Amino acid sequence: MPEFIKPDAGATPPPHYEFIRAELPPGVTMKPEQVVLKRNIFVGSVLTMFIASFVTFWIPLFNGLLGGAFGGYHAGRMKRALAAAAVNSVAVPGALAVLYFFSQHDAGRFFYGLGFQGFVVLHVIGTFIGAVAGAASRPLVTGDLMQRREPLAVSASPTPAPGGVPTSRPARSTETVTPPPPSGPARGE
């Protein structure tokens, strides 16, 4: 059974807050309630991967490498890059299959000797390798790797350096510089 504690008689009571309903000024409205993403990096990296892979679909392994590298670099983080690669490895072959379905050609003629299944396997492998490479290269290029480290401890004496503070330079230079007289023929002669 819970134990109840009686408050002290000398203790100050908690503050009393009064809530007043205020009306908005005319012309000011509330935002509609919806999810608004400030920086939608995931969608951007998926679109980057999709466009680069779809434009170069005729190069089976390298289209995935190119799309994965660009999209992985855009994603910036390994987890986001791999998720974008998973979406892209379904989206590009799906889009190509839909477009190929509407053509008049036989499905067996797609990439002749490679076949559609071989294309999908090479595309998926290339996309994931490119996504890992793109996401891994991002911190090295932008300097994010150095910013994520813990600060190093610095041990120094709190006393000033010997000799005290150096004298400050004057705000304006007091020296005057006169250029040497010109030498050589004068113009117009």
Image (spheres, rainbow, N blue to C red):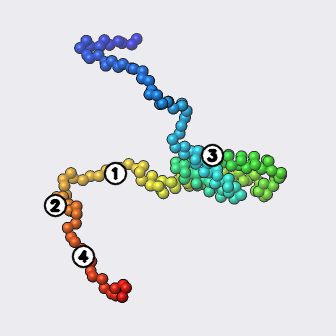
Q: Is residue 86 left or right of residue 138?
A: right
Amino acid type of the residue that numbered disc 2 sits on in the rendered structure: Gly
- The residue under the point 18% across, 61% down is 167
Please state the horizontal and vertical placement of residue 141, each as a whole percent of the image.
Answer: 48, 57
* Residue 10, quarter of picture: top left
- The residue under the point 44% across, 24% down is 23
Residue holding disc 1: 152
Q: Is residue 63 left or right of residue 184?
A: right
**What whole-number distance in Å separates the C-alpha atoms at marks 2 and 4?**
36 Å
Residue holding disc 4: 178
**What whole-number distance in Å separates the C-alpha atoms at marks 2 and 1?**
28 Å
- The residue under the point 45% across, 26% down is 24
Give neighbour class at mark 3: few <14, some 14-19, many 20+ (Cα, 10 Å).
some
**N-terminal-most mark, 4 or 1:** 1
Amino acid type of the residue that numbered disc 4 sits on in the rendered structure: Thr
Q: Are marks 2 and 4 in contact (CB under 8 Å)?
A: no
**N-terminal-most mark, 2 or 3:** 3
**What whole-number distance in Å separates the C-alpha atoms at marks 2 and 3?**
64 Å
**N-terminal-most mark, 4 or 3:** 3
Q: Secondary structure at mark 2?
A: loop
Residue holding disc 3: 86
Nearer-the-camera pick, 16 or 112: 16
Q: Secondary structure at mark 4?
A: loop
